[in-house]
Image (spheres, rainbow, N blue to C red):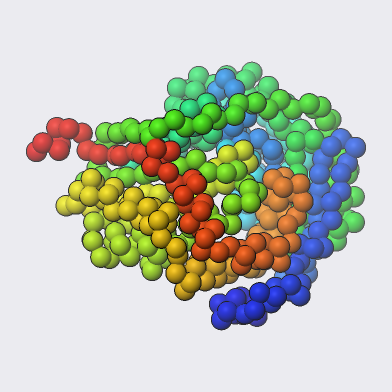
Amino acid sequence: MLVASLVEGAAPSAAADFDDPARRARTTRLPNGLTILTLEDHATPVVSFQMWVLVGSKDETRYSGLAHLFEHMMFKGSKRIAPERHARLVQSRGGRLNAWTSRDFTVYFEDVTSESLPLVIELEAERVANLDISEETLASEREVVLEERRLRVEDSPAGLAYEALYALSFEAHPYRRPVIGWRSDIEAMTVEACRRFFRRFYAPDNIVLAIAGDFDSEEALAQVRRTFGRLDSVGEIPRNPTVEPPQRGERRTTVRFDVRGPLLAAAWPAPRAGHPDGEALEIASAILSEGRSSRLHRRLVYEEEQVLYAHGGYSDMEQAGLFLAAAGVRPDASVDRVETLLFEQIARLRDEAVADAELEKAKRQIEVSLVNGLATSHALAARIAHDTITFGRIRPLAERLDAIRAVTAEDVQRVAATYLVDDQRSVVRVVAPAAAEAR
């Protein structure tokens, strides 16, 4: 009903009385520093167990890619569990599991029926306590990661573009490093470096557990205390203190790759997650590239027929942000022309007030996306974990919706003029080798 009211244009107070399930979330902290978030929601017989480890590529020092490597290593067995058995035990009970790594976090999750939650808790605690980090395991997973890097980055125009764009946009901050790691670092990693990394970051005082769905909180907490509660805290966890210096002019780079059509990508420095300008930047993102009626798609794909796709958006990370835009140029089109068209649309945001209808459409797109975040136990667990880690609290849905609705056309124009400045952008082109261009 709430989704329907948002789409149909309900009054701003429509969400205020909505029963946001996240309001019922409880926070428990164990003596060893472990944070546990529990949210009972018995609408469906499913529970999501998520382990958020507060380590991403920004926390790496000597070897890039270590955080991502452990996303793989954690499935290779422990003292009591054989390699890959963790996954088989969950999947044989109808559950699904996976993991992902970002610049800020590494997250492991299992979505299971309620009776399998005790097993999941035991399995996660076991691999944190007794993970097998051996030469054999490292050699195996190194090859897996190198193959992943080859497929997703080295043989991918988009992967090469974004790797180059982040390295160009951040000169000093560790966000410049690719999450998957540089090839030379992956090849050179040692078992001892892996063990130090694991001891330093996979400790209870650097972990947040989020459990949401159909379960009994007291029973789950009792089991977490018996399992995770036995783990020793690590104490002070070192963090990289680097702050990105101001950008002092446009940056450009060209990547040569065997592509039929060039790829263009650009980025502008933007605020970190939680900044007051975040909602206005989200709306600017939606206006530019949310859906087929967005400005970039309508102008570059439909009207000019210069690109195969065009998109962008505000990426708000824990310590900094980027506003991104990218376009896949048609083989028979000019990358120079596409760049002109793309930056014309950026300039329009700075120079012209957004029409009321376009502003309201963008707001509703974001509102519906926020409400859809309540649709599953998995989404609820992710929301309460991310908010707790990033903002120190779980933000009420009504607060988020009110902030989106409060954005004016003047706000969108102001943030575009503040952040989307020509001499603050970084631009990457992926183009064919010069010999191929000459043919």
Q: Quadrant of residue 151?
A: top left
Q: Is residue 314 above or below residue 151?
A: below
Identify the image quadrant of the C terminus: top left
Identify the image quadrant of the N terminus: bottom right
Residue shown at the point (40%, 32%) measured from the top left: 249
Q: Is residue 54 left or right of residue 262?
A: right
Q: Quadrant of residue 126?
A: top right
Residue shown at the point (34%, 62%) measured from the top left: 297
Q: Which residue occupies the foreground of this view, 22 or 213?
A: 22
Q: Is residue 338 above or below residue 215?
A: above
Residue shown at the point (61%, 67%) measured from the top left: 405
Q: Position of residue 92 (x, y in %)?
A: 65, 56
Q: Position of residue 47 (x, y in %)?
A: 73, 60
Q: Which residue occupies the foreground of this view, 290 or 71?
A: 290
Q: Is residue 128 left or right of residue 313?
A: right
Q: Position of residue 24 (x, y in %)?
A: 82, 63
Q: Position of residue 198 (x, y in %)?
A: 68, 28
Residue shown at the point (68%, 22%) measured from the top left: 196
